[in-house]
Image (cartoon, helix red, strand yellow):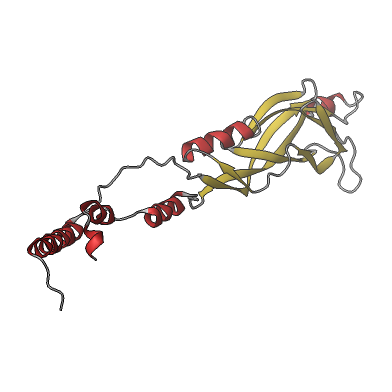
Amino acid sequence: MIRLKKNDKLIIIIAVVIIIIAGIGIAAYKPPEEEIETPETGVNMYTVGWEKKTSSFAISEFASKNTPFSESYVITAPTGSILTNVDFEIAWHDDKTIGIFLKRGLDTLTADIVMDGETKTHESRGEGNETLSFSINDIPYDDTIEADDRSDAEQKIYNMSNGQHTKTYEITVTVKTGEPLRRPLKYLRDNGNDFEIKVTYDYYHVSLIEEETKETGSEASDETKEEEYTPPYLSMIIGTGCGRYI
């Protein structure tokens, strides 16, 4: 049996006390929480969808044999929409004719519709019903956009579709009566004709759906920090010199 000197016993006792104190310190130690500023990596993505809608209204007017009907109109779809197609359905019937089976004195109606410098014409005698169509803009397709927030996304859609939701057009209708001048009474009675134009327009209205925010890198960096963290008690034990007695 090895006998320890008094100094050796004292050193061992001191070492044991130091180890006990270190253990208590390890149990009570709480590493300071460091506030690490991590740059925002979230990206706000929005799905841009388009829903087709149709609206219509009617124009009921009278065209005189002496004064053609001429008027400008504006079609306006909701802001953020894209106007794609406009149909003009022209319908009329001569209200003053002679004869039941063989009608005479039939009027001739001519309607000109002008949009973006393009003119389309309807002409008929006695009565008529025809639809004139104009293609305005291409049909939009669903897509995704990146934006800071919903307001920013709406502004981007507005910038892309600005001016595509409205259109101006002009209608001119003339009537040439069929009553000859040799029948003055019938000629004077026939002053022109009523007509109706039904305007139907298609447009696509936008809808925004926010997708889930994609996070990149933040969780991975936190895991790396935990793996690299070394408890400080190892350096405390080594610093005291207790490693020599363990």
Residue at 90% across, 23% down: 181
Residue at 84% across, 26% down: 187
* Front residue of this view, candidates 245 and 223: 245
The image shows residue 230, relative to residue 114, as above or below, that is below
Residue 155 horizontal/vertical position (percent): 53, 33
* Front residue of this view, candidates 29 and 62: 29
Left or right, 183 with respect to 71, comes to: right
Left or right, 54 with respect to 245, comes to: right
The image shows residue 160, relative to residue 130, as above or below, that is above
The quadrant the C terminus occupies is bottom left
The quadrant the N terminus occupies is bottom left
**Residue at the far left in the pictured view:** 6
Left or right, 59 with respect to 1, comes to: right
Left or right, 139 with respect to 244, comes to: right
Residue 17 horizontal/vertical position (percent): 11, 61
Residue 136 horizontal/vertical position (percent): 74, 36
The image shows residue 114, relative to residue 36, as above or below, that is above
On the question of residue 110 being in view, the answer is: no
Residue at 71% across, 41% down: 84
Location of residue 103 (image quadrant): top right
How many numbered discs?
Answer: 0
* Front residue of this view, candidates 35 and 69: 35
On the question of residue 1 being in view, the answer is: yes
